[in-house]
Image: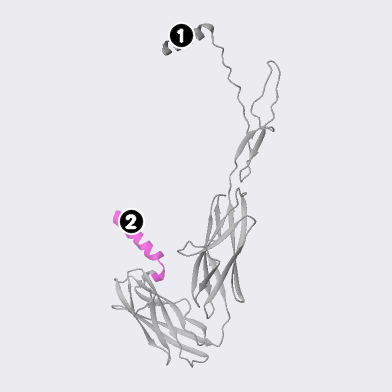
Amino acid sequence: MRKLHVGILLLLSLMCAPAWAKYSGLSLSTEYPDQTVQAGRPVVVPLSVHNYGLAPQQVALTVAEAPHGWKAEFEGGARQVGAVFVAPGESQEVSLRLTPPERATRGSFHFSLVARGRDHRTQLPLTLHLAKTIPNWLAMSASLPTLKGSESTHFSYDIKLDNKSGHDAMVNLSAQAPDGFDVSFTPQYGSQQVTSIQVKAGASKDVSAKVSLPERAQAGKYRLTVHAASGKTAAQLPFTMIVTGKPRLSVTTPSGRLSGTATVGHTTQLALDVVNDGSAPARDLKLSAGSPRTKRPRSRRALLRRAARWRATTC
């Protein structure tokens, strides 16, 4: 019976598995295999080499076809490379730098990229359209645009800046936030605050927007907008902060005095102030009080015994 259960589970997993899960081999891919770039400038194309279920192996990278006069170089780890090593189920990221000839004119140019492993080979066609000028274009995105926390939380949003233009850009960063909220920017893997960051043509940079709340910020939903600008192009991205807060109660009197007098047999009223200086409202409050404990006077005999013990201790 146990073998039957295992067989049924295996069959169900195979039936539910996506089609690509059965694929075994290599893949060579890029997000934009057909794009328009500016004439007269080098083009950097990000590539991903993935190993689907094969043994760990070295994968050679070549440009099988390229227009006359174009220079092609594979780059990885800030150096020129000709191959990558890919483990099963993993991928390696590289870049292809394409430099057009000096007299390259506007038009469409086709390339064929090849990744060759031990027993498998894959090919990627690539098309570049050269234009005299291409519009500047900035884009911003965030995986978690809404965050929730208490008034003591330091909210941090991870932002991806994409430079879609054909030239490097110095991107200025700013934020529009509620009064008292402080927003600062830091680059990925860095702690130094910045107000601008350099983004290469066709590349992206990751930055963090860190938000500090004012002291005793009230609970509620707050919105802020991050702006990125470079020259005549700009982008903006809205974010939401949900501050939960908590009540903080104290009991005092209007005068601040916490003592009073009373007369036996008469009713004495004592005014109290219940104060909430927290960051969230306190609902359904219940007040209670207890009667004071009355100390019984000591008898004369008890006082004499206590005096006798004190004399015996001091002698």
Most extreme residue toward the top is: 301
What residue did someone put label 1 on? 308
Q: Amino acid at mark 2?
A: His
- Quadrant location of residue 90? bottom left
User: Could you tell me if residue 270 is visible in this image?
Assistant: yes
Report the span colored magenta.
1-20
Q: Relative to residue 247, is residue 89 depicted above or below?
A: below
| Residue 303 drawn at (x, y percent) | 51, 9
| Element under disc 2 | helix
Tell me which secondary structure the magenta stretch mostly adopts.
helix
- Quadrant location of residue 22? bottom left
Dot label at residue 5: 2
Q: Residue at the spot x=30%, y=75% of the render?
A: 58
Q: Relative to residue 218, is residue 36 depicted above or below?
A: below
Q: Residue at the spot x=29%, y=71% of the render?
A: 56
Q: CA distance from mark 2 to mark 1?
A: 87 Å
Mark 1 or mark 2, which is nearer the start of the sequence?
A: 2
- Quadrant location of residue 118? bottom left
